[in-house]
Image: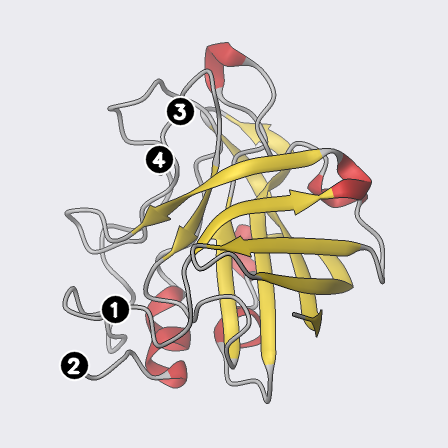
Amino acid sequence: MIPLSRRAFATAALGTLLVGCGGRPAGQDTRTDAPSTPPAGRRRPPKSASAPGGSVPVRLQIPAIGVDTPVLRLGLAPDGSVEVPPITAHDQAGWYEHSPTPGTTGPSVILGHVTVGPYGDGVFRNLSALRRAQRVVARLENGEAAVFAVTSVRTVAKADFPSDEVYGDVGGPELRLITCGGARTGDGYADNVIVFAALSRR
């Protein structure tokens, strides 16, 4: 089985961002302003792809903002866009399983909600408060941990999402944490908050 290439992943992801942060309960679509397909000429992540090496994340810890959450595995929704975690009272982050596993070369992508509808704050409610050099720990299924240091935190309009910077080729193991931010727009938010981090140790 051939893993999804970094460049294919980058171009596919442009139309499959986390855009619905907590409008509706579990079982209902939360990607209210997501396109149903990637833009013309862009590939969807193949459904047969699997995590390219390494051990999958099962827990995420961000001490500076009080995050200690189990990590779900997220795949593709029926329309080919990236799934987001369900809207539940016990909100959890989710790792996109067609991205690299934490600690392997490439940008590993973990998504989370800033709010979860009637249940209140989401697991990534304070993500924008992270600062450079703060620690993010991805605990892996094999018992190991990949420890990352934040390199930057950005808030961007969803229409201007920097797909190449988030999903593109990188020379080492990196992490991307993504949630919503900015002004509320109906069921969603106007912006995305993106945390960039690089591996500091295993």
Q: CA distance from mark 2 to mark 4?
A: 33 Å
* Residue furthest to the top: 118
Q: Vertically, is 19 above or below 10?
A: above
Residue in view at x 59 percent, y 89 percent: 171
Picture mark count: 4
Labels 1 and 4: the sequence-earlier one: 4
Q: Are marks 1 and 3 in contact (CB under 8 Å)?
A: no
**Residue drawn at 27 percent across, 80 percent down:** 3
Proximity of marks 2 and 1: CB atoms separated by less than 8 Å: yes
Q: In this image, 48 relative to 98: left or right?
A: left
Q: Residues within 10 Å of mark 4 (few under 14, many from 20)?
A: some
| Residue 161 in the image, given as x and y percentages of width and height | 54, 61
Q: From the image, tell me which residue sits under label 2.
A: 1
Q: Which amino acid type is shown beneath numbered disc 4?
A: Thr
Query: Marks 3 and 2: which is nearer the front?
Result: 2
Q: CA distance from mark 3 to mark 4?
A: 13 Å
- Distance Cα–Cα, label 1 vs label 4: 27 Å
Q: Earlier in the sequence, mark 3 or mark 4?
A: 4
Q: Is residue 56 above or below residue 8?
A: above
In the picture of the structure, the residue carrying the numbered disc 3 is: 87
Q: Which residue is mark 4?
A: 32
Q: How is the image coloured?
A: secondary structure
Residue farthest to the bottom, as pictured? 171
What percent of the width, then of the height, locates residue 202? Answer: 65, 70
Q: Report the mark closest to the observer, 3 or 4.
A: 3
Question: CA–CA distance between discs 1 and 3?
Answer: 25 Å
Residue at which label 1 appears? 50
Query: What amino acid is at disc 2?
Result: Met
Whether the residues at callouts 2 and 4 have beta carbons within 8 Å, the answer is: no
Which residue is more in the foreground, 28 or 196? 196
